[in-house]
Image (tube, helix red, strand yellow):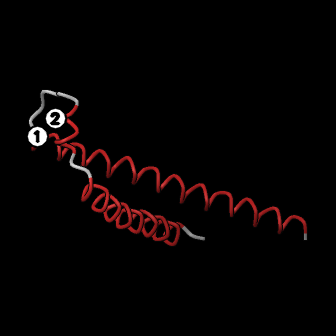
Amino acid sequence: MNNAQSCKCMMSFLWTNALVVGALVFLLFSFIDPAEIARNLMLDVNEGTFRIKVYALSFFFLWLMFNASTFLNCYFSRLKSGTRQQDQ
């Protein structure tokens, strides 16, 4: 695979993972309010900015985890296909 195809493949993984994580964060925070959690923990924070920070950090954390899963899957599948070619 040349560099242009590899870049397209990687960008498609990043983009699709971002879409899935965006939907997941939307669903998650439809049921959980970060400001209510802050109130219950008696944190002295501005509720509006706290919500945005939690949304953003949750999105980026989940996005990194999904990307790690995708790239590990690709890595191990390439290792597996490489060992098959050596066996033949």
What residue is rendered at 68% in x and 58% in y?
76
Residue at position x 49%, y 69% in the image: 9
Residue 86 sits in quarter: bottom right
- What is the number of the mark on residue 47? 1
- Identify which residue, 4 or 22, lies in the foreground: 22
Q: Is the residue 53 above or below the residue 39 in the image?
A: below
Is residue 38 toward the left or the right of residue 86 in the image?
Answer: left
Vertical placement of 75 versus 51: above or below?
below
Label 2 environment density (alpha carbons within 10 Å; few <14, some 14–19, many ≥20): few
Provide the residue designation for mark 2.
Answer: 39
From this view, report whether residue 57 is shown above or below residue 78.
above
Among the two numbered marks 2 and 1 on one chain, the one whose residue lies closer to the N terminus? 2
The CA span between labels 2 and 1 is 9 Å
Q: Mark 2 vs mark 1: give the one in front.
A: 2
Q: Amino acid at mark 1?
A: Glu
Residue 29, numbered label: none
Q: Measuring 16% from the left and 34% from the top, which residue is drawn there? A: 39
**Image coordinates for residue 72, horizontal then vertical, percent:** 60, 55
Instruction: Please state if 34 lies on the left or on the right of 74 as rendered.
Output: left
